[in-house]
Amino acid sequence: MKNTKILKLVLAAGKSNRYGSQNKLLQLLNGKKIIEHTVQNLLKIFHHKEILVVTGYQAKEIELSLKKYEIKTSYNKLYYKGMGTSISHVIKKSELNLDAVMIIPADMPLITSFDYEKVIKAFLKTDFDKIICPKYKNKKGNPLVLPKPYFKILKSLKEDEGARKILPKKDFLFVKTGPGTIFDIDKIEDLKKAELMIKEK
């Protein structure tokens, strides 16, 4: 395996507007908070020092939930403007020490450690010139892995725009993964669906 530094960047700064008055990341899913599921799946295969969680809305509550995992957090003071600001916030601070970044929405607790590993292995087989994207039943999912040549684009992100729409389509390499890579929790109904999906495993 190539000796490389890939930051696992967990986006946990949003206000969960579509979920309602509560922060969805702090809601319980089978006895654990949603963000804990996401982090625990990452910790099954990655060292805690490889993971960084971007906070914003209810930052202290998120940090308390993660304290026992010894994971670093970074506060994005512009979180209220949207996801793009969280990505650019971290890349501006960390780019010199990185070969690539894996961008993980915190509201996707059903991405398995197997899928994370599959995506990383696909990236390591490239010449660090491809964007790795999961795919399940022809639907594009998360997380994306982006090598350093794309950091300039990531640094320019503003407001609620993600990177996917402005990245060159020809540079994408797709990897077949499980259903968790296309399932995020936006509404209360999604939380109930996630509980059923876990029981069916």
Image (spheres, rainbow, N blue to C red):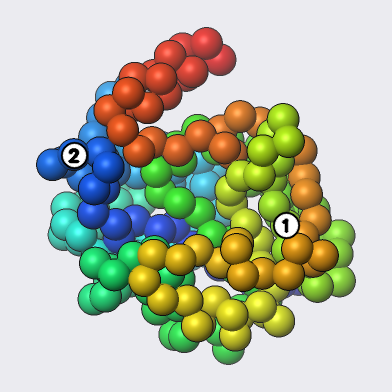
Q: Quadrant of residue 10?
A: bottom left
Which comes before the other along the chain, label 2 or label 1?
Answer: 2
Query: Can you give x and y, in whole percent of width and height, for residue 57 in the image?
Result: 20, 60
Residue 98: assigned label: none
Q: Residue furthest top?
A: 200
Which residue is depicted at the point 43% across and 69% down?
84
Q: Is residue 168 left or right of residue 142?
A: right
The residue at 59%/51% (across/down) is: 143
Which residue is disc 1 drawn over? 132
Left/right of residue 35 with respect to residue 197 in the rendered view? left
C-alpha separation, residue under disc 2 versus residue under disc 1: 32 Å
Q: Which amino acid, mark 2?
A: Gly
Describe the element under mark 2 as helix, strand or loop. loop
Q: Are marks 2 and 1 in contact (CB under 8 Å)?
A: no
Of circles 2 and 1, the one toward us is 2
Give the number of the disc on residue 20. 2
The residue type indicated by label 1 comes to Ile
- Label 1 Cα neighbours within 10 Å, binned few <14 / some 14-19 / many ≥20: many
Q: Position of residue 63 (x, y in %)?
A: 24, 57
Q: Quadrant of the N terminus?
A: bottom right
Quadrant position of residue 78: bottom left
Please, what secondary structure does the residue beneath circle 1 have? strand
Where residue 11 sits in the image (x, y, percent)? 40, 58
Q: Nearer the viewer, residue 113 or 59?
A: 59
Question: Looking at the image, which residue is at 49% across and 18% down?
Answer: 197
Label 2 Cα crowd, 10 Å radius (few <14 / some 14-19 / many 20+)? few
Which percent across, then down, holds residue 89? 40, 78
Decide: is 31 above or below 82: above
Position of the C terminus by quadrant: top right
Which residue in the rendered view is the most extreme toward the bottom? Answer: 96
